[in-house]
Image (tube, grey):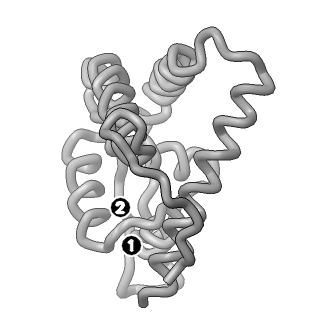
Amino acid sequence: MMQVTHSRKWTLNSRPGHLVMRLARVMGRYAEARIQPLGTGIAGYPVLNLLSAAGEMTQKQLTERLKVEQSSMAQLLGRLERDGFVVRRKDPDDGRSSLVGLTPKAIDALPQINRHMQEGNDVAVAGMTDAEIETAIGLLKRMLDNFEGEANRAI
């Protein structure tokens, strides 16, 4: 268990977790409204982005790299496949698994999706200096590391 070093009394609007959840919901709605007309949802973006950068991968590799549950990845890949954004083919090196790759539809949509994601992040940091943006990113990463470390200790 991580040692707690703060005795702060958190109010609802000063709780980091509450603010991060609100920000995630608002940013998710922003992105979803812009990405849905392209035929997919925001949930598939990390998969599409990773496959675009790394090429074909197995479901297990995607699950490990994106740090999500196997069942969640299976459902997400099913939706992406149904919507024509990914295709699965037998892994020639392992007949028990499939490789997941992007379709031409996904390749065509990714520049627009990336642009919408960029715009959403630009909205989130509007009015901040480069130094403030770097500080915010660093703090968010540290918070994430704290919780991922805590989760690993609990296992």
Q: What element carries label 2?
A: strand
Q: Position of residue 135 (x, y in %)?
A: 72, 36
Mark 1 / mark 2, whichever is N-terminal? 2
Q: Identity of the amino acid at label 1?
A: Ser
- Residue plotted at (59% across, 12% down): 126
Q: Which mark is residue 98?
A: 1
Q: Which of 3 and 128 is in front in this view?
A: 3
Q: Is 81 or 28 nearer to us in this picture?
A: 28
Q: Name the residue beneath numbered marker 2.
A: 88
Query: Residue 7: horizontal and vertical position, in percent?
Result: 50, 60
Q: Which residue lies at the image location 36% right of the left edge and 49% below the top edge?
A: 86
Determine whether 66 is above or below 43 in the image: below
Which label was assigned to residue 2?
none
Tell me if I can see residue 111 in this picture. no
Q: Say if mark 1 contacts mark 2, CB within 8 Å.
A: yes
For image coordinates 54% across by 23% down, the residue present is 121
